[in-house]
Structures are given as C-alpha cells and as structure tokens.
C-alpha cells in the first residue's frame, strides 16, 4: 500500500514534456500573437529609425616654433577654436545663407601630447557641402592667425642670421689681411737686418781706419792736434753706429717679436670668433629649418557612416524573441489557472 502511494506521489511531482507541449498547443494563439507583435514592432522600428549620421572631419597640423614646441599651447588653441573661430565661422556662414547658426555643431579634439587638432561633425548627407565649407572656414581662420606668428618668428630668425653673417664677413675680411700684415713685419725684419749689416760694416771700417791712422802716426816723431781730432771723430762715429745698432737689435729682438706675437694672437682670436659666428649661423639656420607653419594635413572630408543592421536579421531576431515571450506567457497563464484552481479547492 505504501509503495503504491509513493509511486503516485512521485508521478505527481514529475511533469512530462508532453504537458509543456500541450500547454503551448492549447494557447497557440498567444504565441502567434506575440510573434506577430514582435515582427510588427521590428517593422515600425526599422521603418522610422533615424539612419546613422555621416561623420565629417578635418585634421590640422599645428606649426612648430624654434624650440620644437607648437606655436600655441593646446589650451590656447582649444579656447580660440571654441570661443572665436567656430562661433565666428558659424555666424558668418549662417548670415550669408540665412539660417540659424545653431543648425550645425563642430567639435574639437586635441589628442594628449600631440600637435594635431581634429574638427569633427556628424550630420546627414544633405549637409555635406555646408559642413565641409564650415570646416574649411574654421581651419583657415586658425591657419591665418598662426601664419602671422610663424612669419614673425621666421623674420626674427632671419635677422639674427643676417647679423651673424655680417659679423662673420667682417672677421673673414680681417683674416684676409693677416698674410699682408705678416709680410710687412717680415719686410721690416729684412730691412732692419740690412741696416744692422751696414752698421756692422761701417763700424768695422771705422775701426780699421782708426787702426791705420794710429799705425801711420806712430812712425812720426811727434803727434799734432789734428790726429787727436781725427781719432775723436772716428770714435764718435763708431759710438753712434754702435748705439744705432743696439737700438735696431732691441727693436728686432723685442719690438718686432712683440708685434708678431700680437698679430698671431689676433689671428687666433679672429679664427675663434669666426668659429663662434659660424656656429651661431648654423644654429639659427637649424631653427629656421625646424619651424613650420600650421596647415591642414587632411582636408575637410566626409567619411563612411556606421553600417545599418540588416532588416531581415532584425525580423528574425524579433520572431525568435516573440516565440520566447509567447511561450513564457502561455506557461504563466497555465500557472495562474492552476494556482486559482488549487485555491478554490481549499
């Protein structure tokens, strides 16, 4: 007896799959209605769905100054674009075409640690001409302002280079004169050496004459006053020539050497100054070559929009969703009926 009750309780606790199928068959119209409503809803969503807008973009490369940094900081560029260039371009274009300047929007994006500015917009295909013109006008306003900064920097660097070039030209002109100045010093040395040689010959001749006079006079019985006078004149001439020789030797060994050393130092200093001037010219030229003007690297363009989902795929998904919802709804209705029946029996 107990085994029979146990089997009945076990049978009552288990629900065969046929029961689920019967529930669905019994309420088939609910499932069909759910599928139809899902398909109808998907149809209306697909029909009245707003298509994805077309993206529009312009990419601007900000020019660089001599310090390898942008002509303006990112914050300044963002402020000028948001508060000056974009409002001005929108207002002027709206005024010339007779519509509200709020009809279009242009967003600005500046990537971190980048000298690139991106102008972005999204709108329908019919707005292509207006948005491309607006992007171009905004970019041109920014490029025109930066062009003035670029020209000022370029002019300043050009003047610095010209000044350094004038200094270098002057130093090179001085350097071309150094060989001639050295040649003049060498000519002076030769002239002094010639004078020394002549003085040495004159001294030797005077000494020889003096010796001859003394020898000839020693053979005479007595000396007269004329001999003394002659010897005095010869000695005076020898002393003068020796003094002149000493002066020339002093000039040759000290003054000329000093002049030559000073001229050599001037030549070395001139060479160093030329090197400095050339370095300045090279540095300024490098800065001139490194600066660049702001320009558009991607012209205002319309890009491909996001692809729309296939309507057949949406209908298939809505049909599956309707089946699931319809099945769940039939089970819920059956559950409510059974719950109400059990409550009525109690």
Image: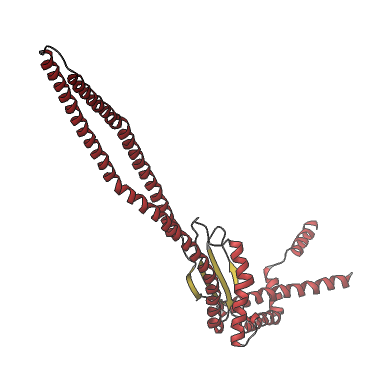
Q: Residue at x 87, y 70 (%)?
A: 343
Q: Number of callouts in the render?
A: 0
Q: Quadrant of residue 243?
A: top left
Q: Quadrant of residue 134?
A: bottom right
Q: Is 284 or 190 nearer to us in this picture? A: 190
Q: Is 206 situated above or below 101?
A: above
Quadrant in the picture for the C terminus: bottom right
Q: Is 219 situated above or below 274?
A: above
- Percent coordinates x, y for residue 265 in the rendering: 36, 38
Left or right, residue 40 beside residue 269: right
**Residue 52 visible:** no
Q: Is 13 or 233 nearer to us in this picture? A: 233
**Residue 72 visible:** yes
- Percent coordinates x, y for residue 220 in the rendering: 11, 13
Left or right, residue 183 beside residue 311: left
- Percent coordinates x, y for residue 91 in the rendering: 62, 80
- Percent coordinates x, y for residue 111 in the rendering: 56, 62
Q: Is 45 or 140 nearer to us in this picture? A: 140
Residue lying farthest to the right in this orientation: 346
Q: How is the image coloured?
A: secondary structure
Q: Is 20 or 14 nearer to us in this picture? A: 20
């Amino acid at each position: 007896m107990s085994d029979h009750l146990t089997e009945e309780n076990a049978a009552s606790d288990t629900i065969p799959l046929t029961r689920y199928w019967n529930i669905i068959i019994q309420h088939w119209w609910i499932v069909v209605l759910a599928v139809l409503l899902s398909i109808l809803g998907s149809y209306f969503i697909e029909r009245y769905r707003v298509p994805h807008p077309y993206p529009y973009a312009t990419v601007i490369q900000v020019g660089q100054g001599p310090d390898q940094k942008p002509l303006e900081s990112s914050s300044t560029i963002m402020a000028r674009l948001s508060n000056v260039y974009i409002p001005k371009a929108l207002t002027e274009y709206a005024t010339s075409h007779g519509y509200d300047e709020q009809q279009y929007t242009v967003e600005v994006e500046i990537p971190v640690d980048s000298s690139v500015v991106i102008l972005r917009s999204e709108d329908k295909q019919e707005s292509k001409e207006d948005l491309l013109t607006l992007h171009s006008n905004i970019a041109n306003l920014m490029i025109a302002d930066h062009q003035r900064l670029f020209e000022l920097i370029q002019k300043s660097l050009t003047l610095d280079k010209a000044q350094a070039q004038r200094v270098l030209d002057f130093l090179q002109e001085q350097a071309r004169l150094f060989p001639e100045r050295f040649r003049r010093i060498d000519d002076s040395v030769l002239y002094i050496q010639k004078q020394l040689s002549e003085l040495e010959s004159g001294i030797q001749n005077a000494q020889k004459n003096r010796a001859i006079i003394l020898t000839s006079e020693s053979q005479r019985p007595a000396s007269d006053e004329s001999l003394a006078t002659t010897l005095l004149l010869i000695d005076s001439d020898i002393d003068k020539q020796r003094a002149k020789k000493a002066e020339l030797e002093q000039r040759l060994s000290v003054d000329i050497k000093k002049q030559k050393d000073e001229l050599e130092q001037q030549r070395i200093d001139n060479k160093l100054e030329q090197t400095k001037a050339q370095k300045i010219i090279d540095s300024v030229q490098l800065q001139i070559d490194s600066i660049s003007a702001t320009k558009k690297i991607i012209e205002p363009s319309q890009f491909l929009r996001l692809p729309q989902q296939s309507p057949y795929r949406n209908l298939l998904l809505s049909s599956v969703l309707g089946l699931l919802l319809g099945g769940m709804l039939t089970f819920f209705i059956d559950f409510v009926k059974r719950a109400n029946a059990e409550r009525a029996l109690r």
